[in-house]
Image: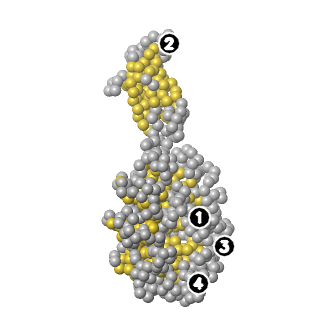
Amino acid sequence: MVAVVALVGMLALPVAADAGRAITGPCRTVFCAGVSQDGSRVVFPFEGELTEGAGNRQFYERSGGKTRPLLPPGLRYWPRLDEVSADATHAFFTTNLALAPEDGDGYGLDVYDISDGSVALVSSGPFDAGPFVSFMGASPDGARVFFEAFAASTPGVPNVCLSLFERFAGQTALLASNPTPPSPPVCESAKFGGLSADGTHVFFTSSAELEPGDEVGDDIYQRVGTSLTRLTTYPEPAGECVEQVKFADASSDGGTVLFSTSAQVVAEDTDLAIDIYKRRPDGTFSLVSRGTDGGSQPCGPLGGDRPIALSADGGTAIFETTSRLSPADTDSSNDLYGADDSGAIELLSTGPTDPNADEHSPVFPDWLALASDDAKRVAFETSQPLVAADKDAATDVYLHSAGQTELISSGLPGKARKGNAELLGLSGDGSAIVFATPESLVANDLDRERDVYLDHPGGKRSTLLSGERIPPEVRISKHGKVLRSGRAALTLSCPKSETSGPCRGRLVLKRSLRGSRLGAASFRIASGHRAHVSVRFRPRAAAPKSVFARVRGADALGNAKVVSKGVALANGRGSKSHPMRREG
């Protein structure tokens, strides 16, 4: 069947991903994206300058058909986009640049929040964050931000262990403390897991004994207000196996939790490899990855099934497994499945032309797939052609919805497709998919560089998000000539910096700024070149000694700009002033 491809972070730092919600996963080099819940706003980094004065290495916001930069220009180093809020009006990023006066730790990493045109330092407070800070997550409204740092739990007392902090209402606080902390170099720090959609439940994993009766090993905890509850209340694995437990997702109200563990929580689980479970609101557990062998490893540290997402109502879980749980699954590759509370299991990573060939990710185990909030739409990547329209071996982005598989990264009709597409984001409602590809999927993608696209499933054509938005500023010469033909000739130049040339447009001559129109002519000039453009005057008038020239220049992307200038006219060699001839 089909395997989805892993993302490699831009920096060697952990990045939390809440599939199908505001954040879409770690960045792959400079390509990632944050998508609003309704798909109307996208935040993405891009190396090239897309708007005038933005500079390179910029974060852009695309909304309402307009692109605007979010960071100050001229950055020396590339920040990392971590997450956006549910409406994408807050963008969180990590950088070692000091972008706020209170950031005084030199070149140490810090977390920032871009909102309403301002940049605010998040990783600050009485607990000195030190040189290492890693963003871990944020509430959907962007009000609560969680980060990890080598910071002292008591001001002034050094600490060699990572600690998990929360920033809220301008205050920084330690998320959880160990009543019996170990001595360094032993560290039992809390690892952020995620948040419920309403932001009231915070989930994290810790090996510390944070409540009486907590057994040795990792456990998942839930914090609601000041109340702390251990969720993994089953016995630890017996023998030499050490439990591998990881929080994956939660229902919107935080009542149902999806997680993976190597422990045999219910009798139906007969192996010690990693399996997927739900914890119900009443505290009971149910096995999600039913019928899987959990992998070949006896204790599961390097194999097993992987949870991806849980629907907002807690009813449907999306997961990945090598087990063949459907008659249509006839290979040994990892595949995506959906399982609901009725016990029904559906193969998602397939299509009408599925070749059922083995496909394996080069990076284990975090292969990328994103699900909508209701888990009814699942986006993924594969190099296998799952529909007839996919006629090459390049990696493409697909969407599975309502039993159907749709090719998202499709190109122009009749154009050969080459180059791998990368899934960057899926909006919470499933209405918008963001991806990157070096292919020109629309007519106004004029280069072979990797670009960012937005697609609305079921629509006719993807939208280019990373299209350059800088209009050409056509230059007008100070002097022109009146030719023997009676036409006026002016020299226009298309700037060399215009990468989306040629410059096209129309030159209009008037007697003065508010004077009558004398004539007009169209032009087409290659980037970095100039051309003489002649204008036939209107009839029955003597050629003026000067004109007011107005030029509207546009590039191949449709970016346009109007420039105006007064131009002196001289007679051409051996010519005399002629009456203005009638336009033919």
The mark found on residue 332 in the picture is 3
Residue at label 4?
241
Q: Earlier in the sequence, mark 4 or mark 3?
A: 4
Residue at label 2?
573
Q: Residue type at mark 3?
A: Ser
Residue 310 to residue 540: above or below: below
Q: What x and y, as percent, mark residue 226?
A: 34, 77
Q: Residue type at mark 1?
A: Val
Q: Residue type at mark 2?
A: Arg
The image quarter in which residue 229 lies: bottom left
Q: Earlier in the sequence, mark 2 or mark 1?
A: 1
Alpha carbon of mark 1 to alpha carbon of mark 4: how far? 29 Å
Alpha carbon of mark 4 to alpha carbon of mark 3: how far? 26 Å
The mark found on residue 335 in the picture is none
Q: Earlier in the sequence, mark 1 or mark 4?
A: 1
Q: Which residue is at a point 48% across and 75% down the rendered structure image?
A: 184
Alpha carbon of mark 2 to alpha carbon of mark 4: how far? 96 Å
